[in-house]
Structure formats: structure tokens, C-alpha cells
Image (cartoon, helix red, strand yellow):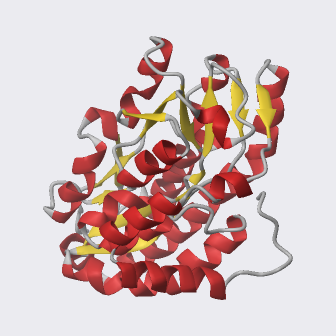
Amino acid sequence: MKKFRPLMLIVPDNHQPTLFAVKQFADNVRRRSDNNLSVASIPISKLVNQPSLVSMVMEGKADMALPVHDRLQICSPKFGCIGAPFAFDGFAHADRVIDGEFMRWVAPDLSEAGVTCLGAWEWGFRQITNSRRPILRPEDMRGLKIRVPTTPLCQTAILALGAIPVMVEFEQLGRVIAQGLIDGQENPVSVIDSLGLQHKQKYLSMLNYTYGTLFHVINSNVFESLSPEHQVIIREESVKAGLFARHLVRSQEKEQVARFISQGMEVDYPDPLPFKELMGPVLKRLNELCGKDNMLAYLAMAERQRRPIEQVRA
């Protein structure tokens, strides 16, 4: 029987839904391949920082990874379009766009970069927490030091709202908040829960101001070295794991928010319209980074998939 080396998959730390989904993926791949394929998952903080993650897959230093969408701009600027502020009405709207037209749109760019996308998993809509005051209107953001990832979109958005963006890598976020070096941060509810930020931040504003997802990518040479049967297993189990991750993130969100409240956190649901009206600089920046034609094409996709019955709050 031919033996295969384990496929190395780099995963984000401190995000329980992803970790559960990765375990399902690895277990099912091993079972369906009769133990001929195995997946070794390695936390990103043990190996590399986020900006270098996709490069490692492209260069063959890692077989697979689960980067947040904006890290894939190294392969195609089109990935930056996903973060367009207030582009989606909810999770179902995002799924229709990303799983359909978007995936077909970026596939040739990924292929040219030596990367194969197996599927979109989940990160979620980003919300804002802080330790100073409730954020009900954009003016409540003024002067707050808000941690953002090292990506231009979030930096520009927080700046447009009058706050001070502070760039900190995800792996350092918990430590920086614990030390009181910043007032707040922005992340999906699942991440807020995974990092225990409800114990360190008093206020949560549910804004859904931008959406993010993890993409499961594999080095194309590695993928093509597998038998057709094993390629099918990897693809199918990635899709299943991605759906599982989405289910966990979305089904747990209401419970997590209710628990935050019971633990003393104040949770508010501001009207998103005044915040959306200030996003002009973000769209301008996205046009520069992603290309105006790409942004127009992406927003047209989002509009085609919009359904009137969906609400802004997912």
C-alpha cells in the first residue's frame, strides 16, 4: 500500500468553530481514504504570521491554509472586494455571492498563482467592542483607539468613523487589550467569544459593517499530485467542513450575545445607515487597491444576488 505524507494545514488560533471544522475535515479525509491521506493541522502562531501565510502555500512551504479573504490579495486584488462595507444584507446574501459568481471570477487568478481554492468557510460580520462607551452613532467613535488588522480596508473604515486605528496582528490582540494599550477592536462575535473579550470590553455594537470569510486553499502542485479519487475526497470534505463552520458560527451567535449580556456586557444594535454614509473614503480606497472595474463588477454581483425579504441584521 502506498503511503502518503501528511498534508500540512495551517489554521487560525483561538477560533473554535474553525478548529472544530478542521477536525471534522481531517477525520473524514483519513476515514474516506482508508488512512492513506492524513491532515496535520498547525496553529498559525506556531509557524508564521498572517501576512506570510498565503506565500507559504504558493511557495510549497505549506500544503494548505485557511487565510482570511484579504490575505489572498497577493494572488488577486479581487479578494479585497469582499470587505466592501455594508455590501451584504446577511449571511445568506454573502453565501450566494461568494459561493457562486465570485468563486468562478477568481479561479483563473488563483490558478495562475499556483493555488487551488477548495471552498469558503466562515469568519463572519465584523462588530465593534470597546471599554469606554456605547457606540450608537458615528460620533461615539471619535477618539477611540480601535485595533484593526494590518489591512487597509479596516484601517480606512475606522478612520472614516473618527476613531484611531491601531494595527495589531491577530495573534497579539488578546495581550494588547489585556494591557490596556487600546480602547477597543472589531471582529465577528465568534472571535470575540473565542478570545474572551466580553470579559475585557464593556460595550459591543452590532454593526455588521463588513463581512469576512476564510478560504481553504491548497498548493496546486500538491493537489494535482493526488489521485483523482483523493482530489474528490479533499474537495468534498472541505465543502462539508466549511458548511459545518458556517453552521457553528451562525447558530451560536445569538447564544453568545445573550451570554455576553448575562456576563455584564452592554450590547447595542445601532442604525447602520449613518455609519454607511461615511464609507466614501473606504470605497475610494478599495477602488485604488482592487481596481475600479473589479469593484464595479463585485458590487454588481452583490446587487444581482440581493433579495428584498432579507434584513440588514443577519
Q: Quadrant of residue 240?
A: bottom right
Horizontal side of 50 relative to 257 (left or right) equals left
Task: Name the residue at 33% across, 57% down.
Answer: 71
When the figure is inspected, residue 305 is found, relative to residue 78, above or below; the finding is below
The N terminus sits in image quarter: bottom left
Which sits in the foreground, 45 or 101? 101
* Residue 259, horizontal then vertical, whole percent: 80, 29
Residue at 84% of width from left, 33% of height from top? 258
For the residue pair 229 and 290, the one nearer the viewer reads as 290
Residue at 42 percent of width and 20 percent of height: 176
Percent coordinates x, y for residue 22 in the rendering: 49, 51
Q: Give the image location of residue 273, x and y in percent.
A: 73, 58
Q: Name the side, left or right, on which 146 lies relative to 278.
A: left
Q: Does residue 238 show up? A: yes
Residue 220 occupies which quadrant of the picture? bottom left
Residue toward you, 307 or 275: 275
Q: Residue 42: x percent and y percent?
A: 33, 42
Left or right for 160, reference 200:
left
